[in-house]
Amino acid sequence: MYESDTIAAISSGLTSSGIGIVRMSGPQAVEIADKVYRSVSGRKKLDDVPSYTANYGYIYDGEELIDEVLVLVMRAPHTYTREDVVEIDCHGGVVVMKTILDLLLRSGARPAEPGEFTKRAFLNGRIDMSQAEAVIDVIGAKNKMALSCSEKQLRGSIRDKINSLRHDILGVVASIEALLDDPEHFDNGNLTETITPQVDGFIEELEKLLASSENGRLITEGIRTVIVGRPNVGKSSVMNRLLGENRAIVTDIPGTTRDTLEETMSLNGILLNIIDTAGIRDTDDTIEKIGVDRARRYAEDAELVLFVADSSRQLEKDDLEILDLVKDKKVIVLLNKSDLEEKTGAQMIRQVTDAPIVSISAKYGSGMDELAKIVKDMFFSGDVLYNDEIVITNARQKAAIRDALESMKMVRKSIDDKMPEDFLSIDLTAAYQQLGLVTGESVQDDVADRIFSDFCVGK
Ligand code: GDP
């Protein structure tokens, strides 16, 4: 156990709610709770109750009744922190929770720092760093997909993968060390022959993990999306339809969406960061020009372009110009106003672009599910969502994996350059250590402190 004191914090949100949870962890947790808890009979001590029991009673400050509570007693080592943990479920009022916390602090507990419960779980070896980071991600998940990635990570998917890679790397280092220790019994040529495919395998695995972080970013942060099209085709209406509420101002006068707005929305679980732009078209009007220039710039940055065309009108030169402007992007054509009589159909659009075409009515909401499906296919090609693929979502872990990959490529280069074996060993060991950063095995204290300081108090 890394520390012997007992910490306490309010673990539920600090707002009025049905139930509030004040939590303690540490060797004195039960003893401190006993100082303030009274069972209904007044005789039962928490010290005597079995682990994992919920005990009904009251919290008293001396003779003053504070609240009616349920006290959960969980004994080490099978707890969140691997220490004794006591949770007091009280009424969820801010004053009640603060009063109980204050009482625990006066009775011998110390205020927990942000993330300190999880930090203890890490330091006591119950979880690794990737799981600790998954705890923050589960709490902060903005959509179901991000949540499911974090839940997998919380169960140890990344830890297991990294540990198995490290184990194999260590095996190769060991065989090199054996050669260096006992050169007479080792055939040099054989060694590089055996380790080359292994090193190639490591490179492949690391590249795969790194590639997954691109999906990870799209899942947790969203796809940068712009809606383009000439004025009045229905861009703001599409945006509003996606948002499910009328946030952007919709007008009948062409070119009145002057500025840009950015909104994050979840399209059947996929996060889109949509920038609503003024119609992209050449214009001399200065105010509008600002909007158009911005639209051009945003389109440059965008990962997805939703090109809106008005199916109730003929295609115009402006439509084609805008389409041309974004031709190198991932584009989806939204053929809007499908509720009106059709003047421009999918076949006509097909003659000018290969992009997928969805017929929609922003006004009545048709076609949105099909749009969601196309976005999913375009960005996630099915596999990330549906199988057990590991997805790296954390920037710190990604950096460590990238470094390990670089080291591994150095190993490959040393093999090609026929460098002495100890060269290989150095870079293999470096990769081993860099991967250890992901699981936290080779993380320095100050880095660990920084990671846990991102947590909320009580977690
Ligand atoms: P923007 O200039 O491209 O942002 O276009 P707006 O969203 O402001 O829409 C222009 C006009 O088209 C408004 O009068 C909308 O009500 C109308 N509109 C937008 N989408 C549809 C649609 O699907 N069907 C019909 N009938 N009208 C639409």
Image: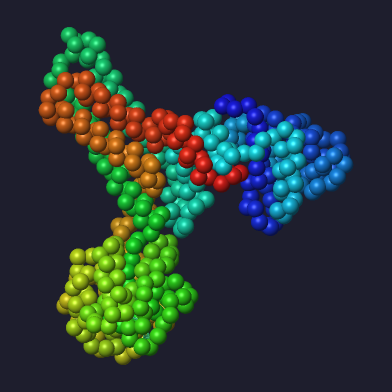
Hey, which quadrant is residue 379 in on the image? Answer: bottom left
Along the horizontal axis of the image, is 300 left or right of 76?
left
Q: Quadrant of the N terminus?
A: top right
Q: Residue at x 79, y 39 (%)?
A: 37
**Depth check, front residue: 357 or 304:** 304
Q: Residue 16: x percent and y percent? A: 69, 57
Name the outermost residue toward the front.
Answer: 286
Left or right: where does residue 287 sit relative to residue 448?
A: left
Quadrant location of the C terminus? top right
Coordinates of residue 180 in the picture (x, y in percent) = 22, 14
Give whichever of 211, 261 is nearer the camera: 261
Which quadrant does ligand 1 occupy?
bottom left
Instruction: Inspect this view and state whether residue 438 appears.
Output: yes
- Image position of 18 (left or right of 264): right
Q: Is residue 332 visible?
A: no
Which residue appears at 55% of the width and 38% of the height?
Answer: 118
Vertical side of 80 occupied by 349: above or below: below
**Where is residue 290 drawn, in percent x and y?**
30, 75
Could you tell me residue 291's position as x and y percent?
A: 31, 75
Residue at left offset 66%, top offset 46%? 10
Quadrant of the rendered image containing residue 115: top right
Give the image's coloring scheme. Answer: rainbow
Depth check: 32 or 106 in front?
106
Residue at 30% across / 23% down in the picture? 171
The mark total stands at 0
State whether residue 247 is above or below residue 87. Answer: below
